Image (cartoon, grey):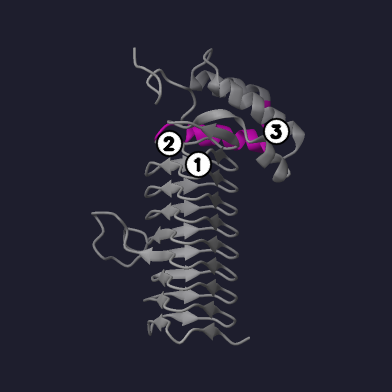
Amino acid sequence: MANKIHPSVVIHESAKIAENVEIGAYTIIGENTIIEEGCKIGENANIQFAHIGKNTRISPFASIGGEPQDLGYKNEKTGVIIGENCWIREFSTINRASGEGSNTIIGNNCLLMAYTHVAHNCVLGDNVIMANAATLGGHCHVGFGVFLGGQSVFHQNLRIGDMAIVSGASAARLDIIPYCKAEGIPAIPMGTNAIGLRRKDVDKESRDALHKAIRLLKSDEYNTTQALELIEAEFKGNKYVDNLVEFVKSSKRGCSLKRHKTTFGQDEE
């Protein structure tokens, strides 16, 4: 099918646009941009240094591939890669990476609602949903099937594990473990993401094992090392629990697990 490109659209000579692409009025398709087949791009969007996968929708006023908000960036060649069947809503910003040859990466089937921000060098897995105004600092890694609530904010360099859900208006500076339901400032696990796990066809035995494992990690009776030893002894061989254990063990920033006396909203003794 032929493309439907409004005559006011500005397209850089280096850009490549496949067939069956729609681009609305006053949009700018900038340098080193590839738009794959079936994409629909709204009015007044700005896209540069980006590879947009098939059938992805980009709403009006979205900004993709702009310079990273990183004082160390020296105009090196970097970019943004967005997967297939994504939807980037109004006024969302996705910055290109910092560091020669690096990319900010969005997986397949992701939904970034209005005013979301994905900073430089972030990596999002498939099926991630960011609700309105959720914000990721640079170098964040977000796992498969994660849901980030509206106006939630995340410190640079942290990880959010597979199928976690974080409630709106939460904030995190440490890693969020997989499969949990987290909330607060700082965001801590309040239990398993039971609904999300069922929707992703995680079997009941594994859901029950994750529930017990997360309770052990949160327990005041054990430190993290002791809890991991108990979890491995009881549930070793379950792929979801194994993933949870490996995530905690490999954390560089540390995982947010328990409420502290200095948590927001509580007086320090």
Query: Relative to the observer, which residue lies in front, 168 or 189?
Result: 168
Total labels drawn: 3
Asked where in the image residue 179 lies, by quadrant, the reply is top right
Residue at 42 percent across and 72 percent down: it is: 44
Residue at 38 percent across and 41 percent down: it is: 155
Asked if the magenta segment contains residue 153, the reply would be no
Residue at 46 percent across and 38 percent down: it is: 169
The answer to whether 244 appears left or right of 102 in the picture is: right
Q: Which mark is residue 207?
A: 3
The label nearer to you, 2 versus 1, is: 2
Q: Which mark is residue 160?
A: 1
Q: Position of residue 33 (x, y in %)?
A: 43, 74
Counting other residues with Cα less than 10 Å from the Cα at mark 1, is it few (<14), some (14-19), or many (20 or more)? many
| Alpha carbon separation for disc pair 2 and 1 | 10 Å
The C terminus - image quarter:
top left
Q: Which residues are magenta?
A: 235-254
Q: Is residue 232 visible?
A: no
Label 3: element kind: helix
The N terminus - image quarter:
bottom right
Amino acid on which the number 2 mark rests in the picture: Ala
Label 2: element kind: strand
Instruction: Specify the principal SS of the magenta part.
Output: helix
* Contact, mark 3 vs mark 1 (Cβ under 8 Å): no
The answer to whether 77 appears left or right of 4 in the picture is: left
Q: From the image, tell me which residue sits under label 2.
A: 172
Amino acid on which the number 1 mark rests in the picture: Ile
| Alpha carbon separation for disc pair 2 and 3 | 24 Å
Counting other residues with Cα less than 10 Å from the Cα at mark 2, is it few (<14), some (14-19), or many (20 or more)? many
Label 1: element kind: strand
Residue at 45 percent across and 53 percent down: it is: 116
| Alpha carbon separation for disc pair 3 and 1 | 18 Å
